[in-house]
Structure formats: C-alpha cells, structure tokens
Image: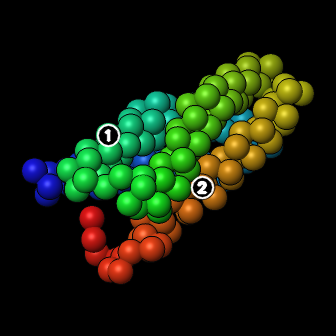
Amino acid sequence: MRAMLRLLHLIGLAAFLGSILVHILLGEVVDPAHDLAGYALAMKIKYLATLILTLPGLALMILTGTVMAWRQRLTLLTAKWLGAKLVLVILIALNGAAVLTPLGAETARLAAEGVLSGALPATFTEVKQKEDIAGALNLLMIVAVSTLALVRPGTRIAVGRA
C-alpha cells in the first residue's frame, strides 16, 4: 500500500509540476505581436492544462499525502514541518483554483477575442499581469513546500523518510 501511495503521489507531482513548466513556457514562447492566433492557442492550451493536469495533479498529491501522513500517524503536533507544509498547500490550492484558473480562462477568452478583432483588448494586459503575479506567488510557495518536504526541519533523519 505504501509503495502504491508513493507512486500515486509522484504521478500527481509530475502532473502538477510538469503542467506548471508547460504553463510558463507557453506564456513566453509565442509573441502576440507576431502571431496573435498562435498566442491565443497557447493561452487556451494553458487553461486546458490547468483543468486537465494542474488541478487534478494537486488534488492527487493532497489526497495521497494526507493518507500517507495518516498511515504514519504524523500529526501537526509531532511534525510541525507538516503543519507549515499543509498551510502552504492549502494556499497553493486556493490560489490555483480561485484565482489562477479564472484568470487563465479570462486570458484565453481575451486572447481569442483579440484574434477576431485583430488586436488584444485593452483589458488583456491587466488580466495577464494579475495572472503572472498570482502564478509567481504560487511558484514561491511550491518551492517552500518542496523544501519542507525534503528538509523536514526538526526531524533527526530528514531526507529519505516518507
């Protein structure tokens, strides 16, 4: 059971982090000034990747991580690093689902609208900047969660325990 949970956790991690890398690259590879249709397609793919990979990967990681912690009888009192990690994961999930996903949908919609009119709408830049800021915040929190998962402050043997 432990091996299966760890495998599912790693699959969730791969889907989550892999889609974030694709999300970042798609936002930077196509220049809307030179290829507006290609840019609109990239924004649509980013949004769909969020729905198909990012959010389900995060949900799988949360589920398997919770079950693994429960099976090891880890509590927030005995493993304070786990409490900090849990708070960050909740913030990541909230920011991803409540902020980034709607902004991604709006970015894709505005880019598609720009293809029809021949130029990005004036509101596009504002929405894209909000998405970039929320994404950067999530990336910082992801680095913090990853660090906590690897270092596990306060434990004698931190790396290698799961």
Q: Which residue is mark 2?
A: 141
Q: Earlier in the sequence, mark 2 or mark 1?
A: 1
Q: Quadrant of residue 91?
A: top right
> Residue drawn 80% across and 42% down?
129
Q: Position of residue 15 (x, y in %)?
A: 38, 48
Callout 1 amino acid: Leu
Q: Which mark is residue 33?
A: none
Q: Is residue 104 visible?
A: no
Can residue 124 be seen by looking at this rendering? yes
- Residue 111, image x and y in percent? 71, 28
The amino acid on which the numbered mark 2 sits, given as a three-letter code, is Met
Would residue 146 be found to the left or right of residue 65 on screen? right
The one of 139 and 49 positioned closer to us in this rendering: 139
Q: Which residue is mark 1?
A: 63
Question: How much space separates mark 2 and mark 1, taking CA atoms?
Answer: 19 Å
- Furthest toward the front, the residue is 77
Nearer-the-camera pick, 14 or 138: 138
Q: Residue furthest bottom?
A: 156
> Is residue 23 shown above or below 50?
below
**Residue 136's spot in the image, x, y percent?**
68, 52
Vertically, is 127 above or below 60? above
